[in-house]
Amino acid sequence: MNGDDEEVVAASADPSPPLEWRFSQVFGERSAGEEVHEVDVISAIEFDNSGDHLATGDRGGRVVLFERTDAKNLHSSGARKDLEETDYPLRHPEFRYKTEFQSHDPEFDYLKSLEIEEKINKIRWCQTANGALFLLSTNDKTIKFWKVQDKKIKKVCDINSDPSRTAGNVNGEVNSSFPPGGISSLRLPVVVTSHESSPVARCRRVYSHAHDYHINSISNNSDGETFISADDLRINLWNLEISNQSFNIVDVKPEKMEDLSEVITSAEFHPTHCNMLAYSSSKGSIRLIDLRQSALCDSHSKLFEEPEAAGPKSFFTEIIASVSDIKFAKDGRYLLSRDYMTLKLWDINMDSGPVATFQVHEHLKPKLCDLYENDSIFDKFECCISGNGLRAATGSYSNLFRVFGVSPGSTETATLEASRNPMSRRHHVPVPSSPFKALSRVVSRESHGVDGNSNALDYTTKLLHLAWHPKENSIACAAGNSLYMYYA
């Protein structure tokens, strides 16, 4: 036990150095004063496991795919030219537009007299196969499984007529592509497959009619065969190959709806253990469940929640405690959660409380009444964690996002703006001493400075969605209809 304690303290003494964030790219940048259409606002962002592809979804039901252009240089062989290039620092990661497709359309539920909007809530990449890309996308009610593959373009050639001339009436004269006197022999056109290719998206399966409430999460299982979908009261387990049947594995709906006290806000599979998943609630708790225990996992194997703070509770206490997003670290040991005020890091082996808490909106506490009046207090900010597990990021208002060092002993805090000039400002604070050596990584950190004056915040420009590259220090984030990318 003492050896473990000494190891934690030693690790705390040598945290990784702070990162310098730089602007990389922007897609869909709008000019000053340009109106943003509601259907163009980005509502989901996701990197694939390799980091070579990025997908975004918007409120208009479209999914846009980007592919990395410098990936070939990163994965190239040891040719002399390639080896010479390694003497120079690598350029920042570059992506280009690949394709887009209409994933969902607006629908109407005639039984419930309910309009179902086309907005994409979540996107999740699936395993690639035979050079094709696979992904899941969902709106409030329907999940779709898409296959995107490059197809060879077919062209028509070897015809008698001149394709550069088109038959028609031009200035009162008949313009015919046929020569005077006609054609002696007619050749049928030939369809030839060219060397050019174009990505084509095809919907493979539709998973519908399984949720009475709005879907807030989908998550792939590490077995590559199943996935979960979660709404306010239920979590369903699907097989990718079977679209007309799902299994209800979590049901928190009470017998009487008047007794409803909490709802499911987010759900995520463990990255390596196919039998484990976690889901968060509106009361600020996170439950870890084991699918091996029973078919209906109403009882959890572990419960993660912060001990109740002493003192009186306000009307807003439960609202700001609601967890809006959870993410597992790549190794599955740590779990990141975001509520309205804070970002928390949990160790799944320690359910007594979070190992680290990072204050994101502490300066908004005096403004909770105003935030409630304009509904901003219900905004659902996402979070993400780096592939190496050393840093985490989450969004805020005025198109700001924050990056925190979550490794033991780190005091790294950066606040950046989603623009061409991110204006990074880093704040260092001493790590408070802890009475428990094993808990020496517990730190509460707050970012002042950039938006310490809450009156200066613009609540209409909020950065809700962002994603961290799985292998590099690169972040993609959405500001309205614009996709900004940064690297360090």
Image: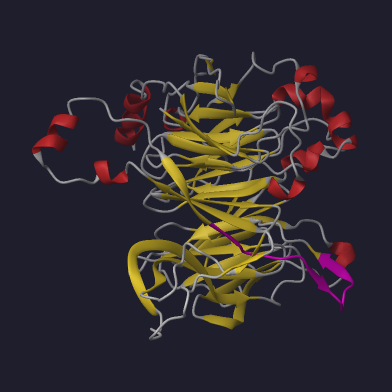
474 or 93, which lies in front? 93
380 or 313, which lies in front? 380
Task: Indicate the quadrant where residue 4 lies.
Answer: top left
Q: Residue at x 34, y 72 (%)?
A: 193
Q: Residue at x 58, y 56 (%)?
A: 63
Residue 111 belongs to the span the image colors magenta: yes
Q: Residue furthest left?
A: 80
**Looking at the picture, does residue 253 appear above or below residue 454?**
below
Tell me the quarter of the image containing the N terminus: top left
Instruction: Give how far across and how far down residue 383 sits, in percent.
Output: 57, 41
Residue 270 appears left or right of 296: left
Q: How is the image coloured?
A: secondary structure
Per the rendered image, the range of residues in magenta is 100-115
Instruction: Give how far across and how far down residue 431 sits, in percent.
Output: 49, 18
Residue 138 belongs to the span the image colors magenta: no
Instruction: Give how far across and how far down residue 158 sits, in percent.
Output: 36, 75
Q: Residue furthest front?
A: 181
Residue 88 appears left or right of 460: left
**Looking at the picture, does residue 324 appear above or below residue 137?**
above
Tell me the quarter of the image containing the C terminus: top left
**Looking at the picture, does residue 150 appear above or below residue 314?**
below
Q: Residue at x 31, y 31 (%)?
A: 7
Residue 488 appears left or right of 214: left
Q: Residue at x 40, y 76 (%)?
A: 159
Instruction: Give how far across and how far down residue 271 sits, in percent.
Output: 43, 57
